[in-house]
Amino acid sequence: MEIVQNALALNPQFFADLIGQNLMWVFIFYAAGHYFTGGKMPLFRGLVFFSLVWASMDIFRLTGFSVFTAAGIAMLYFLRMPVLLFLETSGGLAKYMPLAWGVTFYVVIIALAMGG
C-alpha cells in the first residue's frame, strides 16, 4: 500500500530511497528477469517479478492468509503448469508467459480468498 500511496502522491524521493537502500534486491530481480527469460527484456521482467512479490506481501498482510500452504501450492502448480505449457508450445503466444505467470498467481489468491 505504501508504494501505491507514494506513486499517487508523485513522490520520486521515496522511489530513489527505495532503490538506493535495496540495491541488492534491485540486482536480484534484474538477474531473475535475465535468467528466467533468456536475457529478453530483463528490466521489464524483473519489474514483473518485483510487482508479484510486493503485491503478494501486501495482500497477505491485509488478508491474513497465504498462498504458500499445501492447498495453495498445489492449486498454484496445477493451474499454472498447463497454462504455461500451452503458451510455450503454441508459437505466437509465448510472449504472454510473464502475464500468464502473474494472472495465475492472482487467480489462486482469489480462489483461496473465496474459500476454495
Image (cartoon, rainbow, N blue to C red):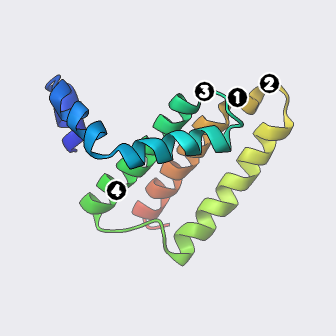
Q: Position of residue 91 (x, y in %)?
A: 85, 28
Residue 49 visible to the viewer: no
Give the image location of residue 56, x and y in percent: 39, 54
**Disc 2 and disc 3 in contact, CB within 8 angstroms:** no
Q: Which mark is residue 92?
A: 2
Q: CA distance from mark 2 to mark 3?
A: 17 Å
Q: Which residue is mark 4?
A: 57
* Viewer-nearest of discs 2 and 3: 3
Left or right, residue 64 beside residue 37: left
Residue denoted by label 1: 95
**Residue 31 visible from this viewpoint:** yes
Q: Residue placed at 48% from the left, 69% from the top? A: 68
- Where 40 falls versus 31 (above or below)? above
Q: At x 79% / y 47%, what residue is drawn? A: 85
What residue appears at the point 26 percent right and 45 percent down from the top-left corner? 21
Which of marks 1 and 4 precedes in the sequence?
4
Which of 104 and 29 lies nearest the eye of the viewer?
29
Foreground of the two, 104 or 50 = 50
